[in-house]
Each structure stands twice: as C-alpha cells, then as structure tokens.
Image: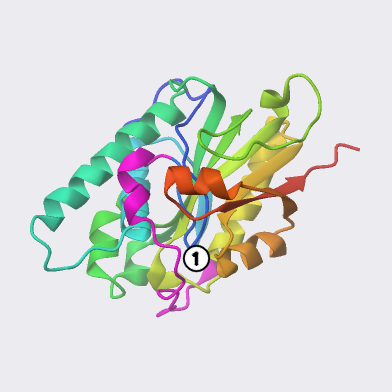
Amino acid sequence: MTLVSSLCSCSLIPFSSSFPLTSNHYGFANIFRAQIQSSASTNICTQKIDTNLLTIAESFYEDELWAAACLRVRSFNQFRADAFGIQDHTRYLADREFEALKERVSGKRMGFRRVSCINASLPLPHIATLSDDLCSSCKFSTNGEDRIVVGTLDLNQCFSLPDEIVGAKPEVIGADITRAYLSNVCVAKELHRNGLAYALLEKSKLVAYDWGITDLYVHVAVDNEPAKKLYIKSGFVYESDEPAWQARFLDRPRRLLLWSGFSRT
C-alpha cells in the first residue's frame, strides 16, 4: 500500500458529473467522451447491503485509488464482452485514470488548490457472490482486510473545471479558495438504489465544509433524470445551464450547473 505524496494541495483535470446513477467524470480526459452513457437503463440493484459494513472516506493510498479508477472505467463505459482486445483496452483506460487521479490527489495539476478522492467501500465477503468483475478489479486491502470500492467521487477546490460552466458564487475575489466542484460520481451498477450515491454526496459536503468551502457545484446532463433527482434530494438547486452551441462543439449532452451553499453563521 503506497501513500500518494503531497496530500495538502490537490488538483484535477475534470470532465463532468452527469450521472447514469453513476455520474460522468472528470479525470478521464477526452478519451472517454465518445463512450459516456447517460441512460439509466442499468440502474438495477441486485443486492441490498448492510450499511453497518459500509465505509466512506477520503482515499490517499495507491491501491485504493487504483480500485476507484477501475470502478470509474466500468461505470462510465459499456463494452461488448466479445469485443476484440477488450481487456487490454479496459486496462489502458484504468491506467490513464489511475495516473491522472494520482496526479490530482498529490497536488500536481495546475489550476486546482486541492482534490480529494472520496470512496465508499464494503468488505469483500459481503459482496463476493455479486460480481466477479467488480470484486476482482475494484479490490484493495486495508489493515489486513480485503475491501471493494463500490462508489467514488472527486471533490475539487478550484475556480472552474475545464470545458464546463463556471459557478457564479461566491461573488468575491479569491473564489478559488471557497468554491468547489464534484466530479466522477459513480456507484457500482450492481448496488444502485442502496443510497450509496447520496451517502457519498453527504460525506463530500462534510469534507468541503472542513476545507472552508462556501459554495459547492456539480454538473449534470439535462436529460439525466436520476442524477438530477439525487442532487436535488441532497440540497442542490439550479443555477445555470450550458449553451447548446458549447455542448455541440464538445460533442456531448448539454449540462446543467447545480449549486449548494454552506452557512458559516
């Protein structure tokens, strides 16, 4: 287990957070744009979880970051099982996201003050019969226990995310200090409808508050109803939307920008 260095100042190369009960991502860069799915057709829960076994925490170790990268690849892409070279391609995508995630969390990405990868995990025996792929690709070990990353997101303290709508709050100099964005929100499709995404959002709010964040944002595709309902339930409200020309130029679904604020009184 290797600790990622320079944890006090983190940054990221984002993308977006539109969520097929997953939420589109920011660390994948352009290699994922053509493969993002906005459909909620896979939102089928096959097993209820024991929430007493669930851990949601910031991740600083490489094996857990690798597990999170693998979950993002399987969440934001749909591959034909019989496609030629699919294992090599999946590994390539996971390697790309893993390296980008390490860079962001270690504070080496320009334009971001801090980035935290927040993961939800369960003990391997609790879901061992659920999915061989999930349990093999998203596994990490901590304190002698094998666990599976079943949900993940990034919390990004920054002024704006590349190629995305910029938040309007706070309307003061130094907004990069007190403004943050969520990205890469996803939950293993086998465990949808267990409240994992909502729990991840609530944990991210606690971390953001500890950072001194006053205004938290998330981007979501306009036609992604499950994601919009989730964020509204978590207290986000509409602030603005992406111009149609920008979405066409970037060849992706048009985004909404949702906002949630923190009171410091």
What residue is rendered at 51% in x and 59% in y? 19
Q: Nearer the viewer, residue 187 or 159?
A: 159
Please provide percent x and percent y for residue 146. Answer: 31, 55
Q: Give the position of the N terminus as an image quadrant.
A: top left
Question: In this picture, is 201 found above or below 118?
Answer: below
Report if residue 42 lies within the magenta region: yes
- Rendered residue at 60%/59% (across/down): 199
| Total marks placed | 1
Which amino acid type is marked by label 1?
Answer: Leu
Q: Nearer the viewer, residue 17 or 48?
A: 17
For the point 23% across and 68% down, the residue is 132
Residue drawn at x 65%, y 36% is 166
Please name the colour scheme applied to the rendered image: rainbow
Residue range of the region highlighted in magenta in the rendering: 27-53
User: Is residue 146 at least partly visible in the picture?
Assistant: no
Q: Is residue 79 visible?
A: yes
Q: Position of residue 157 (x, y in %)?
A: 61, 31
Residue beneath disc 1? 21
> In terms of secondary structure, where does tag 1 sit?
loop
